[in-house]
Image (cartoon, coloured by chain):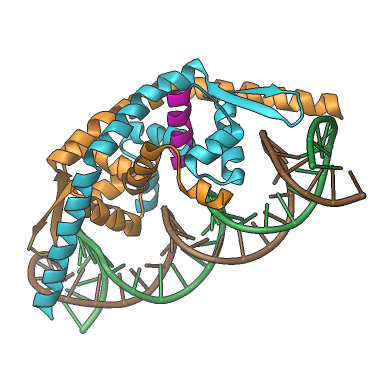
Chain colours: A cyan, B orange, C brown, D green
Amino acid sequence: MSESESVSQQCPDCKRINEVLTRVGDRWSVLVIISLSEYGTLRFNELKRNLGISQRMLSRTLRELERDGLVNRIYHPIIPPKVEYNLTVMGESFCEPVNALGHWALKNLSRIDAARESFDIAKEMQNVASA
Amino acid sequence: MSESESVSQQCPDCKRINEVLTRVGDRWSVLVIISLSEYGTLRFNELKRNLGISQRMLSRTLRELERDGLVNRIYHPIIPPKVEYNLTVMGESFCEPVNALGHWALKNLSRIDAARESFDIAKEMQNVASA
DNA sequence: CATACTAGTTCCCTCCATGTAACCAAGGCT
DNA sequence: AGCCTTGGTTACATGGAGGGAACTAGTATG
């Protein structure tokens, strides 16, 4: 019966936020969004080069983002093929919180590194002491 | 040589943002942060119940968050043990963009569902047409 | 004829995130 | 003595994320 309790998550918002984060919260989706927000419109291989993502993952990520209504896919029926991607209105609205997160990330990366380093040192000292 | 090109990611910010997202961008970290931001201070098992997370993952996630300087761990040496967690200053500053993302998520969940549904319908129609 | 180009897709493989279950320590309650 | 409690850790299993390489289509170019 402690089982049923673990299912009824007491923080209902957490569950829903979890749902959305599972969809659009993965690394590649966020980076694609950021890139499109910065450059406006990009072709498949431009995104690939920008992000250092594999063809497979980019294709998959773009299809999901298109499906979720965050990016537009513009197909030009020429040879060799040309496909352009840009943000939908909802995609643009998603940029605001994402960019906020990006800025926080850039601003605090060094702080995190420092915290991590001092934590590791403290742990090592503790190991030495207990040895 | 197209290899070396793929390594030199033309969008340098993307690489750094990628780094941070890899660290604090996972589902559980975000949810722990949100929970602590909402409740202030929580014990291990309170977090566990709130989030519906497994002991193993919670333990791991909390240790990483502590290591990254986002969460304080307050250990009370009593029996049975009592350990409390709350946000550091940096953890609190992380809440702002995260909450923004959470609000966007809650607000747009239904829109995403709608986009997804119409995408799937369109795809199915196309499949029927091509068949 | 062969090769290159763009945008994918598909197969295969690896590694990691995550869950489950068992175990532990040290004391309290009965 | 034995079971409960909290906060973990460890061993084991597994699904999914993600990369790499090969394949495709259709035309232009050498």
Question: Is B119 situated left or right of B30 in this image?
Answer: right
Point out residue B103 in the picture as x, y percentages from the top left corner.
34, 24
Question: Is D18 situated left or right of B71 in this image?
Answer: right
User: Which is more toward the observer, B39 or C4?
Assistant: C4
Residue A90, relative to residue B72: is it above or below? above
Q: Does A37 appear in magenta? A: yes
Residue B28, relative to residue D13: is it above or below? above
Residue lying at 43% horizontally and 25% vertically, measured from the top left: A38
Residue B66 visible to an observer of this rendering: no
User: Which is more toward the observer, A59 or B32?
Assistant: A59
Residue A124, relative to residue B42: is it above or below? below
Q: Main secondary structure of the magenta part?
A: helix
Point out residue C16 in the picture as x, y percentages from the top left corner.
43, 58
Question: Is A22 situated left or right of D27 in this image?
Answer: left
Residue A9, relative to residue B68: is it above or below? above
Q: Does A8 appear in magenta? A: no
Point out residue A109 in the picture as x, y percentages from the top left corner.
25, 44
Q: How many marks?
A: 0
* Magenta segment: A25-39
Question: Is A44 situated left or right of B106 in this image?
Answer: right
Q: Quadrant of residue B67?
A: bottom left
Residue A57 visible to an observer of this rendering: yes
The C terminus of chain B - image quarter: top right
Residue lying at 31% horizontally and 38% vertically, measured from the top left: A10
Residue lying at 13% horizontally and 57% vertically, measured from the top left: B82
Residue lying at 19% horizontally and 40% vertically, measured from the top left: B91
Point out residue B105 in the picture as x, y percentages from the top left corner.
40, 27
Q: Quadrant of residue D2?
A: bottom left
